[in-house]
Amino acid sequence: MSSFSFRHQHVFVAGGSSGINLGIAKAFARAGAHVVVMSRSADKVAQAAAELEALGAQALGLSADVRDPDAVQAALAQAHARFGPIDVLVSGAAGNFIAPAKDLSPNGFKTVVDIDLNGSFHVLRLAYPMLRKPGASVINISAPQGVNPTMYQVHACAAKAGIDMMTKVLALEWGEDGIRVNSISPGPIGDTEGMRRLAPTADALERAVSTVPLLRMGSTDDVAHMALFLSSELASYVTGAIIPVDGGSALRGGRDMRASYVPRSAA
Ligand code: COA
Ligand code: NAP
């Protein structure tokens, strides 16, 4: 996808060293942006930056934990010194695992909320002074758990619901600065750590795909294309939206009545 141009724009991707977020970083790199990826692992960010440079982008890999506001602040300052005001900010750092609430320790719950929700707040709040005004596009990476109550996911559900609400509140607060804030909510995306954790067996993967109306897993490009669109002029009137990129999976919220259905002719 190269029809969008972000030539020399500054794109900062928190949690950008792998999976969906790296896919987004690469799409912006292909579209001409200067791209910064930040995550905990120094090795992963260095490897990601090398992959972005191989696509022709100027890139920077910065190591920081989103739970540490000082580290996030330092990374943002380094990015700003190199590439100037941030045109596109993607906040997608997350951690997840499957655990029933009754067995989840306080620290297990806190860890996921600290990474996903509090970490996103740190990234957005600390980036605010560096966002281009007017014009910046802020994208939070949410998940279906933000709206669908999901068993064994109380930590991720609470965190992603909080992120979606933060998207809406900041869209209100920052609209007057000309900053748009949206969430992308990916469905099941193939070959990602998230799916390896939530659908760890062939059976579980098959079940996950069978619930998608389009009957396929999404790709990281599917998500990246929405990020490009949301950050382009074409989306200049879109803010505060929670946008599923999920092959229609969000439509499955209602009760499934098929097993109760008796055709009238048979009644
Ligand atoms: N089930 C239940 N509790 C778990 C768990 C699991 N599978 N994995 C970790 N925890 C608990 C730990 O037991 C610990 O709680 P405790 O101190 O009461 O024992 C707490 O969570 C923190 O674990 P720790 O390993 O110290 O956290 P961390 O900060 O090193 O790592 C995680 C964070 C746990 C989220 C880790 O899985 C991670 O780094 N994930 C990033 C990648 C990822 O999840 N990608 C998919 C994104 S959707
Ligand atoms: P992933 O590859 O594990 O991505 C998570 C990223 O966050 C990694 O780059 C990781 O790098 C970073 N990260 C984790 N904890 C961090 C911390 N404390 N501080 C800074 N960075 C941290 O998993 P993914 O499946 O692609 O998920 C990416 C995003 O998409 C997440 O927000 C997830 O909730 C969302 N999502 C995924 C799916 C899916 O199907 N996979 C579906 C819906 C939503 P380090 O380890 O180096 O820190």
Image (spheres, grey):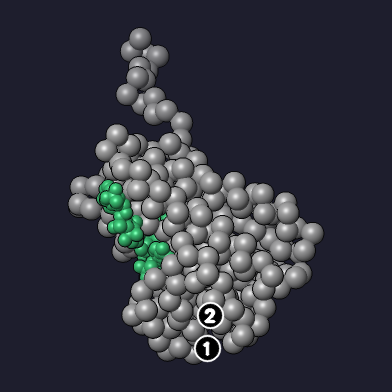
- Is the residue at mark 2 in contact range of ligand 2, meaning its CB lies under 8 Å from it? no
Residue depicted at x 77% and y 63%: 177
Residue 196: x and y in percent read 27, 57
**Amino acid identity at mark 1:** Gln
Outermost residue to the top: 267
* Ligand 1, image quadrant it occupies: bottom left
Residue 249: x and y in percent read 44, 45
Is residue 263 in sight in this rendering? yes
- Is the residue at mark 1 in contact range of ligand 2, meaning its CB lies under 8 Å from it? no
Q: Which mark is residue 261?
A: none
Pointer 1 local density, CA inside 10 Å: few below 14, some 14–19, many at least 20 = many
Residue designated by label 2: 35
Whether residue 200 sits left or right of residue 62 in the image: it is left
**Amino acid identity at mark 2:** Val
The image quadrant that residue 53 belongs to is bottom left
Whether residue 6 sits left or right of residue 143 in the image: it is right
Q: Are marks 1 and 2 in contact (CB under 8 Å)?
A: yes
Secondary element at image label 2: strand
Residue 233 drawn above or below residue 201: below
Residue designated by label 1: 58
Residue 1: x and y in percent read 52, 75
Outermost residue to the front: 70
Is residue 55 in sight in this rendering? no
Residue depicted at x 44% and y 50%: 113
Residue depicted at x 64% and y 75%: 86
